[in-house]
Every structure is written in C-alpha cells, then in structure tokens.
Image (cartoon, rainbow, N blue to C red):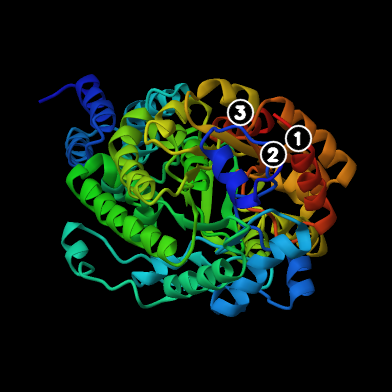
Amino acid sequence: MATKAEIIAKAKAAILDFDEEAAEEVANESLKAGIDPAELIQDGFTAAMTEVGDQFEAGTLFLPHVIAASEAMSAGVKVLTPALEKMGSESQNRGTVLICTIEGDIHTIGKDIVATMLKIAGFKVVDLGRDIAIKDIVSKTSEVKPNVVATSALMTTTMVNQMQVEEQLKEAGLRAGVKTMVGGAPVTQDWANKIGADIYAENAADAVTKLKALF
Amino acid sequence: MSNYTPKERLARILKGQSVDRMAAISVTQTGTVEQMEACGAFWPEANEDAQLMAKLGEAGHTVVGFEAVRVPFDITAEAEFFGCKIKAGTKEQQPSVIGHVIKNIDDIAKFEGYSLDHGRIGIICEAIKILADKYGKELPVIGSMIGPFSLAQHLNGDDWFMNIFTDEQFGLKLVEFATEFNVAYAKKMVENGADTMVIIDPTASAQLIGAEFYEKFVVPSHKKIVDAMNELNVPTVLHICGDTTAGLALMESSGVNAISVDQSVDPATAVKSVKTAVIVGNLDPVNVLWNKTPEFIKEKSKEVLDAGVALLAPGCGIVSKTPTENLQAMVEMAKAHKY
C-alpha cells in the first residue's frame, strides 16, 4: 500500500494534471488508507491549487487551467465530503465571505476566480451566484452573518447597484457588522471610496491579500 | 486639404493614410438616455425595432456630434439568433445572455443550415440600411457584432473557458461554427450599407486565456472575418476588454486595421506595440466620461491624444447615463486634433 506521503503527492499531481478522475481515485485511496481527509485536502489538493494560482498570477497558466484544476479539486473533495462531515472536522476558517455578481450582471468568471482563491486561502465562501437581487444579498447577509460581503460588477451599467448594496445594508442595520468588498473590470478604488465600500480588490490575488490582512 | 467627407476621413485613418485631422467617432456602443430623450427612441424598444434603432443610432451624430452613425447598442442579437435565453434590457441597460444552447460537439449540427433572414440580426441590418440610405454618402456607417470567441462562449456557457483546454476538438469546431456565422453576418451588414466593421470580442483576451490559446482559438477566426471584409474594402476594428497590452501583437496578427483598447491599457505603450494596426481609445467610460466634467474630459483627452492614438474614443461602451456635454467635450478634442 502507498504511504501517506505518496498519496498526498498523488493528490497534488492529480490537480496539477487537471485530472478529475485521478483526483477522485486518490481521494478514495486516501479514505481506504485512513488518512485524515482534511489533511489530504490541505497538503494535497489545496497545496496544488495554490501552485496553480501562483502560476496564474505569474502568467504561466491561464483561466482554462485554473478552472480545470479547480474542477478536479471539487471532484476529489466531493469524494471526501461524507467522511469529512462524519468527523465534524472543519478545515481552518479565517472568516466567511458572502460573494456574488451584482443584480443585472451575469458575468461570473472574475467572481468565480475570486471565490476559488479565497477558498484556497482558508475562507469559508458562500457564493450566491450571478445577477443577485440587492434584497437577496441583504437577507443572506442577515442569515449567514458573514465577515465580508463581496460584490462583482463587470459592466458600467451594473456597478451602480453596488451603491445600493451599501445603502440597503445600512437601512437593514447590517452594514456595521460587515466589511464590504467591491471588484470587477470597471470598478476602481475611486469608485469604492465614492460609494463607501470598505475594500476594493483589483483582482483575485489582491482580494486574498487584503482579506488576509483583515482576518 | 480638408475636402474629405467624414466617411473618407475615417476610412483613411483606419488604413493608416494621411488626413487633415482626426475623426470624432466611437467604435463602441453610443446609446445614452439623453439621446433617447432627444430623439424619442428608447431602449429596450430601440434594440428591437429597425426604425427606432436607426433613430437612436442617428442621434449619435445629430445630438452628440459623432462623425459617424453606428448600430447596434448591444452584443446579444447573435446569441439570441441561435436561441440562447436573453434577459431583457431596460431603458438604461442592455440585454444580456443568460441561457446557453450548445453543450457538446453533437449539439452543433442542430444549428447548421440556418438562414440569416430571421431574428434581431435582420432588424439590425434593416437599421443599417435606413442609416446608409440617409447618411451613407457622407458619414461612415459602422456595423458591429460580437466576435466568434465570445459568441462561442455565449453559445456554450461558462464551461467554454475549460472546454477549449479539455476538449480541443469541440472548442475548435464551435469557434469555426461561430466564425462562419460572423463572416456571413458581417457580409450581410455590408450588403445593407455598413462600411466599417467593429468586432467586439470581450472575453477573447490573451490576458485571460494566454497566448497559446489565443493563437489557436482567436487569431484564425478574426483573420477569416478580416479577409472577408478586405475583399469588400471594409476596414475592421477589433475591441477586446481588459488589459490587452501583452496581447496586442497577437491581436494585430489577424490583420485588423485598428485595435480599440480599454482604459486599463496605457495608450502610449499600445501605440508602440503595434506595427500596422492603429490604436483607438481609451477614455474611461465610467470614471472619466460619465462621472467627470467636460473640462476634466478635455484634460484626459489631451493625455490620450499625446500618447499618439489614431482615434480618440471611449475605452468601452458608453454608459447610458453619460451626459451629452461630456461626450461633446471628447468630440471637440478629437476634431481639433491634427496628427
């Protein structure tokens, strides 16, 4: 039987090869060998995703690779999830981030990358999806009680809705309990200042750095 | 010296030939609420009715002072043509694509053999004809369409970015399918009187997909469109969103006449990075054109002009709430510029 180090190395390789089946296989093998699923995720899958993320930032890997690697990781994690839940073990949690693409906007790629990178960095991410009504952001904030409410706007016509997030969170009395983060192609630090958002993230790496500094 | 019509002037600029002064145009969408109120043609109806579309396209010239007329105002008619689900636009917002119709290589065959006569693309061609009949002798008539890579993404959905990596055969086939459509549609716009073709391929960004994928999935399809337009003596402009600085040489390799860069590109660097294509751009549509004053816009325009762009223009689609006087400040600066 393979040693723990070998299995973890295999898990890394599966992600770096963008291989969903290999990720599932190694997850099963790891369960049989009695390895702590959280450890396999942390030292195997997540470590490999971090490498992919670094290479994406460096411009040696691109969006297709990041998505394929993250799909492979999801496939592996799915196999491990029942065991993880049974053990009641949670991997490290830096804080909870509620994230979505703003009302009126259906672009998801940028938001998805940010969500993936935040997960890798140890945040619990609640991804509401795209074109999310402001009132739903507010009600989810009240329900989930996240540390951060992050919205992405990819169009000049929808970024105005980020202003609404600020206003409606205030009206609901929730604004003081969260940090708001804004991002997306047309969004700038100026815009964040103007609408009163706490954090502007230029890209996924920037989002991770800024949230890590806070939590 | 100055006896060029606006139509001749723009064509010469795009082809890199000498002219008396800069032309004042926007290669990206021009519709704004103030123009709608001035001409009585409003979104969303102006996206669906040829007369109203032409009226609002014309307002870019008659209300703002652009030296061209341009339609349409969105990039969803192409996906809609193939049956993608569309979220309707409003007075201030363009429609968007929310449903997708092609999952795998077998799905493509279902869409072969289409006729270009139905759907909103026909309405766009009709609007082009109205504008060409009225202005075609004097003014450039700019047609625009989504590019094949982004159309493929609309057709396939979010998996598209992974599929070009994990299922190359499907990726290439879908891009080829989209390209054939683009070529036929562009020709149809030209038949109806368009004399300048803008390809808007927002997600075909080398920054997102890297040079290797860009070369394989984007350059050949843009080249096919450019070649077809060259045969008809129609110059092409390519607009891709984001920081395209590193991808400019690749974008240019398709043979496009002009590249429209967005506000995240340094225009001086862009001008230096291209050999044959000319650079169009790149005033920030939000933080400059929409939210600032005419004085500030003139200052920013000067910076962009000093960088050596061939055409001063918005870096992306004009925001619908942009004040007319702000756009006029840009128009004024462009018209006053000599190369």
Question: Disc 1 residue type?
Answer: His
First of labels 1, 2 by sequence position: 2
- Quarter holding residue B116: bottom left
Marker disc for residue A209: 3
Q: Tell me if label 1 and label 2 are in contact, CB under 8 Å.
A: yes
Q: Find out whether the residues at labels 1 and 3 contact each other: C-beta distance under 8 Å.
A: no
Residue A181 position, x and y percent, is 68, 44
Q: Is mark 1 on a helix, strand or loop?
A: loop
- On what subunit does the disc labeled 3 rest? A
Q: Is residue A111 or residue B259 the one in the foreground?
A: B259
Residue at image mark 1? B337
Q: What residue type is labelled 3?
A: Thr
Q: Which amino acid does label 2 sit on?
A: Met
Residue A87 is situated, as x and y percent measured from the top left of the image, at 36, 44
Q: Given the image, what chain letter belongs to the residue carrying mark 1? A: B
Marks 1 and 2 sit apart, C-alpha to C-alpha, by 6 Å
Q: Are marks 1 and 3 on the same chain?
A: no
Q: What element carries label 3?
A: helix
Secondary structure of the residue carrying numbered label 2: loop
Compared with B132, B14 (above or below) is above
**Residue B83, image x, y percentages:** 35, 72
Split into 4 quadrants, where in the image is the N terminus of chain B?
top right
Q: Mark 2 lies on which chain?
A: B
**Residue to which mark 2 is pinned:** B22
